[in-house]
Amino acid sequence: MIINPFEFRTVPSIQVAWGGARRLGELLSVRFPERRAQLITDSGLMKAGLVAPVAEALSRSGFSVTIFDRVVADPPEQIVTECVASAKESGTDIVIGLGGGSSLDIAKLVAILLVSDQALADMYGIGNVRGMRLPLVLVPTTAGTGSEVTNISIITTGQTTKMGVVSPQLYADFVLLDAELTVGLPRTHTAATGIDAMVHAIEAYTSKHKKNPLSDSLAREALRLLGDNLVTACNEGNNRPAREAMLLGATLAGQAFANSPVAAVHALAYPLGSHYHVPHGLSNALMLGPVLRFNAAAAAPLYAELADVLRVPGNGDATSRSNAFVEHMDKLMVASGAPRRLRDVGVTDSSLAMLAADAMMQTRLLVNNPVEVCEDDALALYREAF
């Protein structure tokens, strides 16, 4: 088989360590000479008591720590501006993101903006970032977004639109995977973020233009880990093996889709976050079933392969195995306890046409889908999910 030319990029260093966040200063002090850290997180993690032990661990190893805890879901540009101002005031020379995808996305951009005179607005799109950045460390507290290993940051612009910055400079220098940080994640968030990670693996595996053997391998292993452990992690939140498998699976899926980009599920999910503030992982979970069925005719051979990865019972041709895969994913989402209908999260029937029009703006994502999606298709998919 001839291998089509491709490039694969990822972060240079990942450490997996249960309880590693409580030793973060020790881990970083031997890797970085910088000592003035900006720790970027959200107020929920502060209240949950997850941030203080990390800050103390940094302080014990000689880091001075400034905590910025004002990150919110679907962060607007103003959060980036405020975080940069805080970091400049404290003389930050190393940026640490601790949290879900929003905190990690903010940390990536702050690390660039602290040493760049380029405006954030000029960075949106693919490959538009100029120059370098400060040292960047990312520590995820959810098993879902994969942001810790991607070169992408998503920011809310205006009232309801989202824009992405995609550039190699957004790859972190060091990633810590400490699944102990995910133990307190509620069932609903565990389900939504876990399904989000599965969407990353599936869409990377079926991406139209940049699918490649390395991303395929990562996507398959990610899907195996996630599929085997999602329900257990939801039902038994303290189950260490399940939590570790979910976090590693989410990271592998992140590496896959950073190189073989996601598609229509994400394109249709973004307007739900912008207009209704539905968490990103849940938005993906809500749109996954309809998009899988929409893509099935074109993606059947690949879905059949993923059915084997998940050890879905049965046999038959590619079409029957593809159908079995889609049915299995539906059952898995039901078993996880995640909401299943748009109406369940406050979406109104009268807004579906508006959501479809907004989804069409996500051309960066839609171009990767195995099947072309027009506005009428998007509206039909929202109606199916409603």
Image (tube, rainbow, N blue to C red):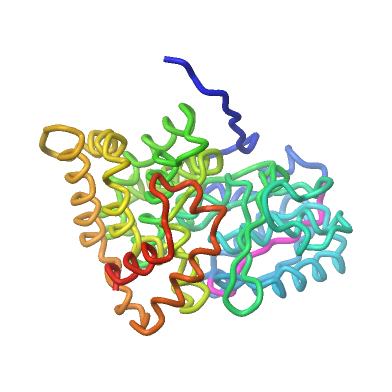
Camera-nearest residue between 130 and 134: 130
On the image, the x and y values in percent for residue 32 come to 77, 41
On the image, the x and y values in percent for residue 310 come to 25, 39
On the image, the x and y values in percent for residue 265 come to 41, 57
Over which residues does the magenta segment extend?
Answer: 34-44
Indicate the quadrant containing the C terminus: top left, top right, bottom left or bottom right: bottom left
In reply to whether residue 78 is colored magenta, the answer given is no
Camera-nearest residue between 86 and 54: 86
Residue at image position (67%, 45%) is 172
Q: Residue furthest top?
A: 1
- Please state the total of marks drawn on the protein image: 0
Residue at image position (61%, 34%) is 9
Indicate the quadrant containing the N terminus: top left, top right, bottom left or bottom right: top left
Camera-nearest residue between 91 and 276: 276
- Asked if residue 361 is positioned above or below residue 8 in the image, the reply reads below
- Asked if residue 122 is positioned above or below residue 35 in the image, the reply reads below
- Asked if residue 208 is positioned above or below residue 351 in the image, the reply reads above
- The part of the image, by quadrant, that contains residue 104 is bottom right
60 on left or right of 256:
right
- The part of the image, by quadrant, that contains residue 362 is bottom right
